Amino acid sequence: MKKVLLALAVSSIVTFASASEKTINATMSLMAQGMNQVQTGFLYSNREDVTSGIEILENANAIFNKVDVTTFIKHNNKVQVTKNINENLAENLEEFKKAVEKKDYTEATKYYGKVTSNCIACHRIVRGW
């Protein structure tokens, strides 16, 4: 199943030229699956699940890096903010991965929190949450 999710994420990067509602929902679903995989890995002390979840998140975030966000954000002044969030998320995921590789799970949970914060910040803009 992990390979299927990663394949879906990678193939979505190629086909994600414009931001349609369907592809946004599919990418959000990937991000939710990645977050769930990470959380399951933490709860069951399974490093592979945490790493796999981070990979899913990285792939889903890469899709958004290729998206013209002006197609689904009504206020253009918020476009740069979402791009900044995308960059911050990529950096936090990289640090998250490094912490897991070092088996520093306390530090890893700090970055899990930062990743969650990035998600919420974007949802506030896009969804008006």
Image (cartoon, grey):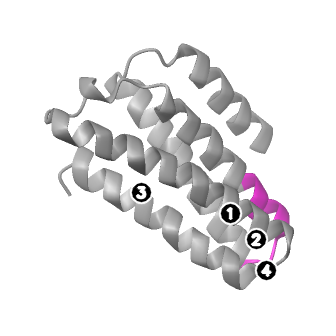
CA distance for labels 4 and 3: 23 Å
Q: Nearer the viewer, mark 4 or mark 3?
A: 4
Instruction: Using the image, determine if residue 64 lies above or below residue 123.
Output: above
Quadrant of the image for the C terminus?
bottom left
Quadrant of the image for the N terminus?
top right
CA distance for labels 1 and 2: 6 Å
Residue 16 visible, this orientation? yes
Disc 1 + disc 3, Cβ < 8 Å? no
- 25 lies left or right of 57: left
* Residue 16 drawn at (x, y percent): 49, 19
Task: Judge the density around disc 4: few (<14), some (14-19), many (≥20) Cα neighbours within 10 Å.
Answer: few
* Amino acid type, callout 1: Glu
CA distance for labels 4 and 1: 11 Å
Residue that lies at the very extreme toward the bottom in this rendered image = 106
Task: Judge the density around disc 3: few (<14), some (14-19), many (≥20) Cα neighbours within 10 Å.
Answer: some
Q: Nearer the viewer, mark 2 or mark 3?
A: 2
Disc 2 + disc 3, Cβ < 8 Å? no
The mark nearer the N terminus, 1 or 3, is 1
Q: Which residue is mark 3?
A: 119
Dot 4 lies on which element?
A: loop
Dot 1 lies on which element?
A: helix
For the record, the magenta segment spans: 43-52
At 27% from the left edge and 37% from the top edge, which residue is drawn? 79
* Amino acid type, callout 4: Asp
Q: Which residue is mark 1?
A: 95
At 63% from the left edge and 32% from the top edge, which residue is drawn? 9
Q: Which residue is mark 4?
A: 104
Q: Nearer the viewer, residue 60 or 3?
A: 60
Residue 1 visible, this orientation? no
